[in-house]
Amino acid sequence: MVRTPLTPEERDRGERLGRLLREARGERSMADVAAAAGVSAETLRKIETGRAPTPAFFTVAALAEVLGLSMDELVARCALAPV
C-alpha cells in the first residue's frame, strides 16, 4: 500500500503536537513517560521531533492521559489553522 505524502499543513500539525507533548513532559524523562503510556521511547522521540507527524490515535490518547492533557486541548492546540 502506497501512502499519500503529507501536506505541509499536516507536517506543521505534527510539529505542534510534538512541541505540546514535549512541553507537557517537562522535566520527566522520555523513557518514564513512554513506559507509563505503553509506547517505546523511540516512538515518543519521533512524535516529539515531528518525525512521526501522524501518530496513531490510541498512542496520542495514552500519552495525553499520562501527561494530564485532555484530547480536547490537544485538538484545539494542534488542529490545522483555518484557511
Image: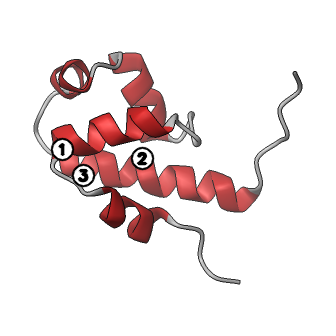
Q: Is residue 44 left or right of residue 46?
A: left
At label 1, counting other C-alpha atoms closer than 10 Å, the crowd grade (few under 14, some 14-19, many 20 or more) is some
Helix, strand or loop at label 3? It is: helix
**Residue appearing at x 42%, y 34% in the figure:** 58
Helix, strand or loop at label 1? It is: helix
Query: Closer to the observer: label 1 or label 2?
Result: 1
Helix, strand or loop at label 2? It is: helix
Quarter-wise, where is residue 40 in the image?
top left
Residue beneath disc 3: 23
The residue positioned farthest toward the bottom in the image shown: 83
The relative height of residue 79 versus residue 29 in the rendered view (above or below) is below
Instruction: Look at the numbered discs 2 and 3 and tell me whether their residues touch, using CB distance below 8 Å.
Output: no
At label 2, counting other C-alpha atoms closer than 10 Å, the crowd grade (few under 14, some 14-19, many 20 or more) is many
Label at residue 18: 2
Q: Position of residue 9 (x, y in %)?
A: 68, 62
Quarter-wise, where is residue 28 in the image?
top left
The N terminus is located in which quarter?
A: top right
Q: Position of residue 35 (x, y in %)?
A: 22, 18
Residue beneath disc 1: 67
Closest to the observer: 64 or 45?
Answer: 64
Badge 3 amino acid: Glu
Q: Position of residue 34 (x, y in %)?
A: 26, 24
Badge 2 amino acid: Gly
**Residue appearing at x 52%, y 36% in the figure:** 55
- N-terminal label among 2 and 3: 2
Q: Give the distance between the C-alpha atoms of the residues marked 1 and 3, in whole angstroms.
A: 10 Å
Q: Is residue 8 left or right of residue 61?
A: right
